[in-house]
Amino acid sequence: MVLNTCEINNNQLLINKYQTIAMKDNVIHKVMLTVNHKDYTLQILPWVSLLDALRDRLNLTGTKKGCDHGQCGACTVLCDGKRILSCLTLAVMKNGSQITTIEGVAGPLELHPLQKAFIDHDAFQCGYCTPGQICSAIGMLQENKAATREEVQELMSGNLCRCGANSGIIDAIMEVKEQQS
């Protein structure tokens, strides 16, 4: 779909109009988040997704915008230790929460074991889905629900890899799972 200049200008005018109304009506919300162990206070409109707040306001661009409909898992982050789709989550809903993005999973001097395993198992090709895959895998391992390879595959099925690195991704997760046992 191609938009002409008039459509783009009209859309921008509409966005500006709603932003002006929102500011006049005091619907800008103060949201406090702890992201990767740092405290942030954001002034945001109520319809800003957590994904957009992370990428556009905090400049944490490791979390990817894939489908923006919760179907691909590229936007997966950890919220209070549980994996969530940040594109489907309004930032105001997570006021006071602890968020971990791919930028926060590694230690100061060393990669997270899953990051190492992804490298060892060549579990990425283009790398676009990798941040969401790793965050989802960390959350899945913390849930401790998967006992077999098939269960890991099922619990990771919401994270799509369009390049076909799925077997390497599952191999990497299984290696870390076995190390944790």
Image (tube, grey):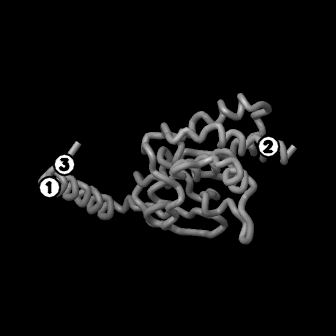
Distance from disc 3 to disc 1, alpha carbons, whole Å, reads 7 Å
The image's mark for residue 105 is none
The residue furthest right is 181
Q: Quadrant of residue 106?
A: bottom right
Residue 147 drawn above or below residue 14: above
| 80 over 156 or under it: above or below | below
Residue count near mark 2 (Cα–Cα under 10 Å), binned few <14, some 14–19, many ≥20: many
Q: Disc 2 or 1, which lies upstream in sequence? A: 1
The crowding category of the residue bearing disc 1, from other C-alpha atoms within 10 Å (few below 14, some 14 to 19, many at least 20), is: few
Q: Nearer the viewer, residue 126 or 159?
A: 126
Which disc, if any, is residue 3? 3
Q: Give, as a three-letter code, the residue at label 2.
A: Lys
Residue type indicated by callout 1: Thr
Which of discs 2 and 3 lies nearer the camera? The answer is: 2
Residue indicated by mark 2: 177
Residue under circle 1?
5
Q: Nearer the viewer, residue 26 or 67?
A: 67
Separation of marks 2 and 3 at Cα, in angstroms: 48 Å
